[in-house]
């Protein structure tokens, strides 16, 4: 039952990508910005989680929540300081700013604590092998999957059932019409950044738990892969980001499993190229035709 | 209720409104007619806070609202049905109507008002769970108006509700506008369909290239030679 094991590994990895991809896609949906600093928020989440469990002796779940809260605040600060004033300028200006913010976060982190990597404690969460239909599955993979799926369900609930979620959907569809409903567009955009960044923070802690090693530049590759996942699913689409992340995780795991582990990272970008050629709107992408 | 004085609005360097003054009294239907690009929509957008005037005052219920943000203006009881309906086509009819009541907290009254909207527009009740992007133009206009009513406005700004609709639908929409007005909502109606607009309004203003060129009693305007020549298809 090797394949089942690989599938579960792939889905666990994919759920990390999915959590990061959600932030990309939500922010894109609402202000049409590819927030390249998002991978670094993920990195900050991993470090906050690390310090929470090592310096403050917290257990996994409180550390996860602390990381989510601090990343949410960081996301709002980034939006207010860097992106808000660029809302009416060209998209390329905002995009370049996002790259600048990304570098700023990476190197300020290195400046403050150095570039050396850290390792999450092995015993943070008890890890048992569970035998399921003949496959050995680590309880950690299941925990990761459980946390990710819970967060995604929570997100769906927020987006579809709460007032702030409805406001987010309204602003992403037509910000001016949303204003006429009495929706505070600025606050709604901030809320989007807060939620997206909190999910990235959670992904950071989960990543640390799963891969152990974290460092200040760890956000770059997962950030880019999550971006690929978001494009694969259809940028702007929340179910798209979830599916895109999962598919990407499974494909990467399969590529490694069949013996091409050095090609793992390349797989993601080959996928990006293929989508951009054949289906630029992604799996759940909206038809770009507009009805006048 | 609404008094606008000497309003100047610019898009960059282009002046869209040139010293517009206008007044709407409580309970009235006032119409603003004029050709494409005359500044009608600009005026409504300025009232609802989407645009900022460079000079001039907008006084509503005795206080100035020039500097208020759009969402606070909605709170004071002004609802704007924008040109082209602008319904949230990614959401259902019901979700659109819920968003209309976004700022309200009085749940019990909201569901009462929802019923009232469905009485005014029975078509929306049938299509309640349908994505609003699948509605016809007329139905989307009904939804946009219903959504605005859900905010319980004292003053309703309507921007070209007849645009692109079949004559029969236009008639229905105008009957509903009159009914909304009878129920106690003051209406400022922007229209290109001058004939229909003047037939339900008490008073009217004619706007040309950013200036009010004529104003007065709707019946008088309807009979005036200038209006007939310019907007009612010849004398």
Image (cartoon, rainbow, N blue to C red):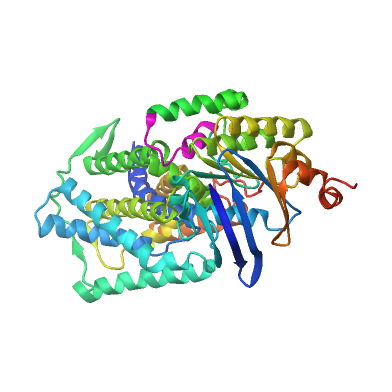
Image spot of residue B49 (x, y percent): 51, 55
Q: Is residue B32 left or right of residue A162?
A: right
Name the residue at the right extreme. B235
- Left or right position of A61 against A253: left
Q: Position of residue A213 (x, y in %)?
A: 23, 60
Residue A206 appears at what percent x and percent y?
A: 26, 50
Identity of the residue drawn at 48% across and 36% down: B152
- Position of A19 compared to B224: left or right? left
At 48% across and 28% down in the image, what residue appears? B113
Residue B94 painted magenta: yes
Q: Main secondary structure of the magenta part?
A: helix
- Magenta-colored span: B93-107
Q: Is residue B102 magenta?
A: yes
Residue B182 visible in the current orientation: yes
Residue plotted at (21% across, 59% down): A48
Which is nearer the eye, B232 or A112?
B232
Q: Is residue B136 visible?
A: no
């Amino acid at each position: 039952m090797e394949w089942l094991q690989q599938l579960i590994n792939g889905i666990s990895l994919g759920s990390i990508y999915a959590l990061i991809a959600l932030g990309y896609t939500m922010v894109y949906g609402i202000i049409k910005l590819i927030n390249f600093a998002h991978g670094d928020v993920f990195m900050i989440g991993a470090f906050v989680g690390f310090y929470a469990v090592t310096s403050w002796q917290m257990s996994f779940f409180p550390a996860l929540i602390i990381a989510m809260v601090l990343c949410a605040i960081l996301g709002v600060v980034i939006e207010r300081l860097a992106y808000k004033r660029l809302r009416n300028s060209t998209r390329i200006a905002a995009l370049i700013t996002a790259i600048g913010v990304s570098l700023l976060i990476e190197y300020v982190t290195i400046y403050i604590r150095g570039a050396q990597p850290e390792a999450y404690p092995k015993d943070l969460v008890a890890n048992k092998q569970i035998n399921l239909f003949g496959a050995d599955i680590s309880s950690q993979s299941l925990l990761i999957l459980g946390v990710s799926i819970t967060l995604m369900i929570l997100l769906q609930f927020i987006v579809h059932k709460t007032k702030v979620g409805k406001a987010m959907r309204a602003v992403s569809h037509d910000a001016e019409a949303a204003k006429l409903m009495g929706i505070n567009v600025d606050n709604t955009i901030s809320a989007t950044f807060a939620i997206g960044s909190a999910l990235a923070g959670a992904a950071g802690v989960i990543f640390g738990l799963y891969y152990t090693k974290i460092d200040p530049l760890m956000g770059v590759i997962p950030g880019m892969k999550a971006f690929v996942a978001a494009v694969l699913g259809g940028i702007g689409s929340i179910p798209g980001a979830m599916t895109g992340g999962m598919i990407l995780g499974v494909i990467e795991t399969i590529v490694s499993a069949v013996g091409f582990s050095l090609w793992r990272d390349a797989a993601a970008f080959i996928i990006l190229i293929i989508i951009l050629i054949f289906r630029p709107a992604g799996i759940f992408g909206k038809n770009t035709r507009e009805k006048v | 209720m609404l008094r606008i004085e000497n309003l100047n609005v610019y898009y960059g360097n282009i002046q869209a409104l040139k010293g517009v003054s206008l007044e709407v009294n409580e309970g009235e239907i006032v119409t603003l007619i004029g050709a494409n690009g005359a500044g009608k929509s600009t005026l409504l957008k300025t009232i609802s806070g989407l645009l900022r005037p460079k000079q001039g005052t907008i006084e509503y219920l005795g206080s100035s609202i020039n500097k208020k943000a759009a969402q606070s203006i909605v709170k004071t009881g002004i609802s704007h049905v924008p040109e082209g309906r602008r319904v949230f086509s990614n959401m259902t009819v019901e979700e659109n109507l819920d968003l209309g009541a976004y700022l309200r907290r009085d749940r019990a009254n909201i569901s009462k008002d929802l019923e009232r909207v469905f009485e005014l527009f029975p078509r929306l009740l049938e299509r309640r769970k349908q994505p609003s992007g699948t509605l016809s133009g007329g139905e989307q206009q009904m939804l946009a108006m219903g959504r605005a009513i859900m905010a319980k406005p004292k003053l309703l700004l309507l921007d070209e509700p007849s645009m692109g609709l079949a004559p029969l639908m236009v008639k229905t929409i105008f009957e509903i506008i009159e009914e909304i007005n009878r129920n106690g909502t003051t209406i400022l109606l922007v229209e290109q369909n001058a004939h229909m607009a003047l037939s339900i309004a008490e008073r009217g203003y004619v706007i040309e290239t950013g200036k009010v060129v004529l104003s007065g009693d709707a019946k008088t305007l309807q009979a005036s030679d200038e209006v007939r020549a310019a907007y009612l298809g010849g004398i």
